Amino acid sequence: MTTTTLERPRLFRLPDFRRLWIADTVSQAGTAITVLALPLVAIGPLHASPFQAGLLVTCEYLGFLLLGLPAGAWVDRMRRRRVMIVGDLARAALLASLPLAAWLGVLTLPQLYGVAFGLSVCTAFFDIAYQSHLPQLVDGERLVEANVALEASRTVTAAGGPGAGGALVAAVTAPVALVVDAVSFLASALFLSRIRRPDPRPERAPGARLRDEIAEGLRFVFRDRLLRALTIAAAISNLCGTVGASMLLVLLAGDLGMSPFLCGLVFTAEALGGFLGSLLVTRVAARLGEGRAMVASVVVSGTLWLLAVPFFHADGRYAVACLLQGLGWTAFMTFKVGTVSLRQRLTPAPLLGRVNATFRFLAWGSMPLGALAGGLVGQYVSVRAALWTGAVGELLAVVPLLVAVRGRRALDI
């Protein structure tokens, strides 16, 4: 029996970690449906153009760009579990407003944009608090394992979510399908409220100013060579990846006229690939070393996604595209999980919220810009050109990692 096999039961016997894991899994299951349903509301009933569809994706990530930095400083001043519960309840209310508006016949694109932006703000606070709270529930030696467990459950729920979401959208329409996600956030808030570990308000230095606290998080990230490289690499990957991703459903549902169920299959393939990749993270890192593993992860995943672009057609080639997309996520998980674990391991607890916020601001804040660029390319050049642009650009994410390698042994920690 391997060490991993022996450790996992001990991790899941921790009641508070188990409640966090269940809460996250439940909410991710609903979110996997929304990933498909929200843009289909825009593309279908509201007849959004490629630019308008790209603008929706921009709104889905805009909160990280506008509030990412102050959110980290605020989270470091607040009880983190309470932040997560409030975030879940607010997201449930926002999503519930869409089927209500559709039922009343008043659903519009501006409301869709507003809800998407509100979700991004709540998610910005929730994710920073969640990543900062996890080290309070598990010890440092189990952080990688805990992150792998959470990421694996996310990819498992994401695997079934889009396919189930496609069937649900076909059966009850996209706005009504969003009710499922609203309910999932309510369930997540319930499980989070049952965590028993004390959640004290973090101590704050007398007279500390918000601006100074934000600057402290920025300095910590950019003065550390490794954290700086990981953050810039993630920002490039997310920026370019969103250029193509923002137009993927426009291509599938709009240009190719594929059904919601078939549209969901590519997300299912990505999630299955991500789940497989999450199971291989520790083995790949042990075999290659953390640094080499992350460099290889970015290069291999970017190459596979580039190869997938010409296969997106409404025939048998679509299966090949889904396979390549899934394998790309298998490769990318080493970088994704490794980045989170290293950030948690290298950052002092009082700074963790601000460091996570700095990372989110730069890495996720680049995504609305990518979505806006994707919408412009899709509108004025072609939707497929946006996919090519994003896929080629993603390979550039390896550059900051290679720069950081110089003078070190492949970033091995």
Image (cartoon, rainbow, N blue to C red):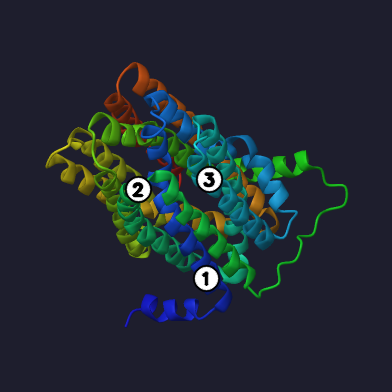
The residue at the point 49 percent across, 31 percent down is: 109
Tag 3–tag 1 contact (CB < 8 Å): no
- As measured in the structure, the alpha-carbon distance from the residue carrying label 3 to the one carrying label 1 is 46 Å
Specify which label sits upstream in the sequence, 3 or 2: 3
Q: State left or right for residue 49 relative to residue 187.
A: left
- Amino acid on which the number 3 mark rests in the picture: Leu
Q: Which mark is residue 124?
A: none
> In this rendering, does residue 403 appear at all?
no
Q: Which mark is residue 169?
A: 2
Q: Which mark is residue 100?
A: 3
Assign a secondary structure to mark 2.
Answer: helix
Residue 175 rendering spot, x and y as whole percentages: 44, 45
Assign a secondary structure to mark 1.
Answer: helix
Note whether 141 is above or below 308 in the view shown: below
The residue at the point 72 percent across, 60 percent down is: 79
Q: State left or right for residue 126 relative to residue 412.
A: right
- Nearer mark to the viewer, of 3 and 1: 3
Specify which label sits upstream in the sequence, 2 or 1: 1
The residue at the point 43 percent across, 42 percent down is: 38
Q: Which residue is mark 1?
A: 141
Specify which label sits upstream in the sequence, 3 or 1: 3
Assign a secondary structure to mark 3.
Answer: helix
- Amino acid on which the number 2 mark rests in the picture: Val
- Nearer mark to the viewer, of 2 and 1: 2
